[in-house]
Amino acid sequence: MNFNDTIITRADATVDDEFERDVLHRGSTISLNWTVYSLFVLGAALSWILDGFASFATALLVFPPLIGLFIGQRWMRRRVPLPRQMGNSRFDWLFGPIVLIIWVSGIAYRGFGGALEFIAGTGGGAVIGIILVELLISRTGKRRAADEERLAAESED
């Protein structure tokens, strides 16, 4: 049993039946989303509070949820196909860009003195990042199908 399975076993021990387990899953999903929202707000606030490189270092707050998501998906894909992509809510479409603009503006102003080079580079990087994310998201269906085939083949053995 690996560490991730131990985490699941410990969580399962806190509930008595499938209904409670389902509610635990739903609560964990809500917690994960609000943790990400909170980290983004914290990053935006700290980018305006901290000076110099420390303002830029607030970008490191993006990594904990990404690492957790990566580990969780790798664990899950050994058991079930990659889940379908979840759509964004209106809140996500409003919250995300506004907080990211505030965050990057704080880094540009506090960390780089409002340098146009930083702002232009960040804008270009954002466009490239959005394109890459869209390409990865578009592959979700193919990866799910490949996972279904792989899991079916493994269950036949």
Image: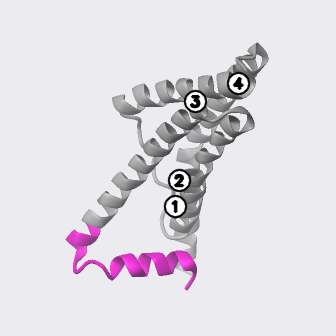
Q: What crowding class fits label 2: few (fewer than 14 Cα within 10 Å), some (14-19), or many (20 or more)?
A: some
Q: Which mark is residue 48?
A: 3
Task: Choose the circle earlier in sequence order: 2 or 4.
Answer: 4
Q: Which mark is residue 148?
A: 1
* Identity of the residue drawn at 50% across and 70% down: 79
Q: CA distance from mark 3 to mark 2?
A: 41 Å
Q: Quadrant of residue 64?
A: bottom right
* Identity of the residue drawn at 53% across and 74% down: 4
Q: CA distance from mark 4 to mark 3?
A: 17 Å
Q: Is residue 111 above or below residue 141?
A: above
Residue depth check, mark 1 versus mark 3: number of the one nearer the observer: 3
Front-most of residues 153 and 53: 53
Which amino acid, mark 1? Glu
Q: Which residues are magenta?
A: 1-22
Which amino acid, mark 4? Thr
Which amino acid, mark 3? Trp
Residue 122 as seen in the image, left or right of residue 68 = right
Q: Quadrant of residue 100?
A: top right
Q: CA distance from mark 2 to mark 4?
A: 32 Å
